[in-house]
Image: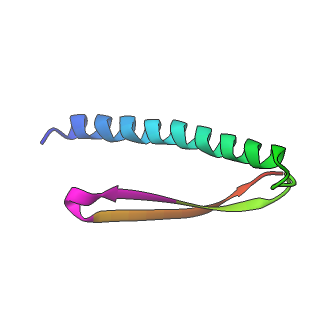
């Protein structure tokens, strides 16, 4: 196993996840606000799950996204 290659691959995966997840959250919040489902001052509870099925790993991160 090449540690440098592993690190690079993990970083690329996390960067892709972070960019696409942020875009999805922004679009969902903007749509909900435009439809009147959000006032724009809420705090949203968020959960992200990382799953490596072949290794039997599941890691859950929970947090808050504040709109104002």
When asked about the image quadrant of residue 27, the answer is: top right
Percent x, y for residue 68? 84, 51
Residue 40 horizontal side relative to residue 12, left or right: right
Seen at 51% across and 41% down, the residue is: 18
Q: Position of residue 19 (x, y in %)?
A: 53, 36
Of residues 38 and 1, which is closer to you in this image? 38
Please count the marks in the image.
Answer: 0
Q: Nearer the viewer, residue 15 or 2?
A: 15
Give the residue furthest to the front.
35
Looking at the image, the residue that sits furthest to the left is 1
Q: Quadrant of residue 41?
A: bottom right
Residue drawn where x is 45% and y is 64% of the image: 60
Compared to 22, does 57 lie above or below? below
Q: Residue at x 21, y 60 (%)?
A: 55
Q: Position of residue 63 (x, y in %)?
A: 61, 62
User: Between 14 and 54, which is closer to the camera in this rendering?
Assistant: 54
Using the rendered view, name the quadrant where residue 5 is placed: top left
Q: What x and y, as percent, mark residue 67? A: 79, 51
- Asked whether, in this view, residue 22 is left or right of residue 56, the answer is right
| Residue 25, magenta (yes or no) | no
The stretch in magenta equals 48-56
**Image quadrant in which the N terminus is located:** top left
Residue at (35% x, 64% y) in the render:
58
Tell me how the rendering is colored.
rainbow
- Horizontal side of 10 relative to 43 (left or right) equals left
């Amino acid at each position: 196993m090449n540690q440098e290659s592993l690190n690079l691959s993990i970083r690329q995966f996390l960067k892709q996840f972070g960019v696409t997840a942020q875009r999805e959250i922004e679009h969902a919040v903007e749509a909900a606000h435009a439809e009147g489902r959000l006032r724009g001052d809420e705090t949203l509870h968020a959960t992200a799950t990382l799953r490596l099925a072949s290794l039997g790993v599941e890691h859950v991160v929970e947090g808050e996204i504040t709109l104002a």
